[in-house]
Image (cartoon, grey):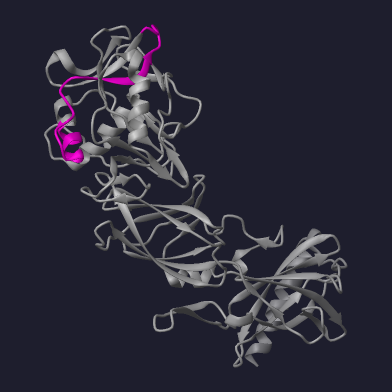
């Protein structure tokens, strides 16, 4: 009774409103287009040998990753509607036999018999290209759970079959499920220093020998164990960079054969830092190791100067007039050859050339080289600055800089480093401490930077607080008494 009264009152109000204003008369609704009806879709998919994915757990006994389905997750179906690639998400239902049923509603107009790409998880799919998203692995957090959710990517292709009962997909033969193949491998990296002590990294980079960064791992909190999804790594050399306690670390590894997708790899990465040494065979070691050739002075990427690191020789070449510097450095390089990635660096990398030029009393480099020159060379003013910048961080001498690293993830130029002398004797102490000797003298040392406004002048750096040999200065190339030479190795 009460409900009837409410309805009558509502109707009366509507009629009153209509009578009060003819402009508000209720009109006959316009004809609406019929809603397109999608195509019901269901199919069974499998993961080949691994049978499943998504939830990943480490089986340390059998040295593998155990993968299982999770009901409710999504796979992407990418198919053609006319000439347009179309992406539809299908929901996963886990089956007891290790397969999964996927169900969705395809867009009306899907082409019967056309190719369908299935990508798992759906978030990894690029609906425009029908492939896995480019740069999907560029940023990771180092956890197995995140790999399971985002990076343990599987992909398969099949044929769309549409009938009166709906649509399904098969591998080309009716009733046979599409098998999805893994696209990446999973790595567990345990990070240590060269003395085999575990180290917690707050950032970790993997890159190839050409300098292309494959992935950047940023864990939620610093850790010594990182799980990383990586694509096929072809046989060759790979580099690892890490930030550990705000200090830069570096390592390299060589794989003799291509890695395989769907596999689980475990490896310990022993990483070097500023103050460690490089050996003649191109490996890093702690000080005191046989065949050590130079001390790592800085780690990072400085365009045109070094891609990976710069190291300083353990001893002087000698005191030399400028006209003989190239010859003597060549002899030093031959006697202290270093082989990295199959290339032996045993000659003076720049010969009689200057590495860069400077302008004015500030000794700021204004003309850089045209490309990186790897190997032994006389340090330029910029090289010297970054040697000071890095090596001074390993000594507590008064007046030295405390900043320890270059950002490996963003190009920088020399202006990010020290630009003025900073107690030259403290730099000398820091270098001698790093080299474990007292060979660097409180005298002027040649730089490979030429004075831009007068090419008869060559820069020098003095390692004394005495004004006679203090900081940056210039010598005439014809100066008969010459200056000392300490080489650097850039890579």
In the rendered image, is residue 423 in sight? no
* Residue in front for this viewpoint, 291 or 194: 291
Q: Is residue 59 magenta?
A: no
Q: Quadrant of the N terminus?
A: bottom right
Q: What is the quadrant of residue 225 in the picture? A: bottom left
Q: Is residue 22 left or right of residue 211?
A: right
Q: Which residues are magenta?
A: 429-456
Using the rendered image of the protein, determine whether residue 128 is visible from the camera's viewpoint. Answer: yes
Is 83 positioned to the left or the right of 337 in the image? right
| Residue sitting at x 35%, y 50% | 283
Q: Nearer the viewer, residue 121 or 352?
A: 352
Residue 430 image offset from top left, x and y in percent: 17, 35
Image height of 104 relative to 131, above or below? below
Provide residue 438's location: percent of width, then percent of height. 14, 33
The C terminus lies in which quarter of the figure?
Answer: top left
Q: Quadrant of residue 24?
A: bottom right
Up the image or down, 344 lies above or below 81; here it is above
Badge count: 0
């Amino acid at each position: 009774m009460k409900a009837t009264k409410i309805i009558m009152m509502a109707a009366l109000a509507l009629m009153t409103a209509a009578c009060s204003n003819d402009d508000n008369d209720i009109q006959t609704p316009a004809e609406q287009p019929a809603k397109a009806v999608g195509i019901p879709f269901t199919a069974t998919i499998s993961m080949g040998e691994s049978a499943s994915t998504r939830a990943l757990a480490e089986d340390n006994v059998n040295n593998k990753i155990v993968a299982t389905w999770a009901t409710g997750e999504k796979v992407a179906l990418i198919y053609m509607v006319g000439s347009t690639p179309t992406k539809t998400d299908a929901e996963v239902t886990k089956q007891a036999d290790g397969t999964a049923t996927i169900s969705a509603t395809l867009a009306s107009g899907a082409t019967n018999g056309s190719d369908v790409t299935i990508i798992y998880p759906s978030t990894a799919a690029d609906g425009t290209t029908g492939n896995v998203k480019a740069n999907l692995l560029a940023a990771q957090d180092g956890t197995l759970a995140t790999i399971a959710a985002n990076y343990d990517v599987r992909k398969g292709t099949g044929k769309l079959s549409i009938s009166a009962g709906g649509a399904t997909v098969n591998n080309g033969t009716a009733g046979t499920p599409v098998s999805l193949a893994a696209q990446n491998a999973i790595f567990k990296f345990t990070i240590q220093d060269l003395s085999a002590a575990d180290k917690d990294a707050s950032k970790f980079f993997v890159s190839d020998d050409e300098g292309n960064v494959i992935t950047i791992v940023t864990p939620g909190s610093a850790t010594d164990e990182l799980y990383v999804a990586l694509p096929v790594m072809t046989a060759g050399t790979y580099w690892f960079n890490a930030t550990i306690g705000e200090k830069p670390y570096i390592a390299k590894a060589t794989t003799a054969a291509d890695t395989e997708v769907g596999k689980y790899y475990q490896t310990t990465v022993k990483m070097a830092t500023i103050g460690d040494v490089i050996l003649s065979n191109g490996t890093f070691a702690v000080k005191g190791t046989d065949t050590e050739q130079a001390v790592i002075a800085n780690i990072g990427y400085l365009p045109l100067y070094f891609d990976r690191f710069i190291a300083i020789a353990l001893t002087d070449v000698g005191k030399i007039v400028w006209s003989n510097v190239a010859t003597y450095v060549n002899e030093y390089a031959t006697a202290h050859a270093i082989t990295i990635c199959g290339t032996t660096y045993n000659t003076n990398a720049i010969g009689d050339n200057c590495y860069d030029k400077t302008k004015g009393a500030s000794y700021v480099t204004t003309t850089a080289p045209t490309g990186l020159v790897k190997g032994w060379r006389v340090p330029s003013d910029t090289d010297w600055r970054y040697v000071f910048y890095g090596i001074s961080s390993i000594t507590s001498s008064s007046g030295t800089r405390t900043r320890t690293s270059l950002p490996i993830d963003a190009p920088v130029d020399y202006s990010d480093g020290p630009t003025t002398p900073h107690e030259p004797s403290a730099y000398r102490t820091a270098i001698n401490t790093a080299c474990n000797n007292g060979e660097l003298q409180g005298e002027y040392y040649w730089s490979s930077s030429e004075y831009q406004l007068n090419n008869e002048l060559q820069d020098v750096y003095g390692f004394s607080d005495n004004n006679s040999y203090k900081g940056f200065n210039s010598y005439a190339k014809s100066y008969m008494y010459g200056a000392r030479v300490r080489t650097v190795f850039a890579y």
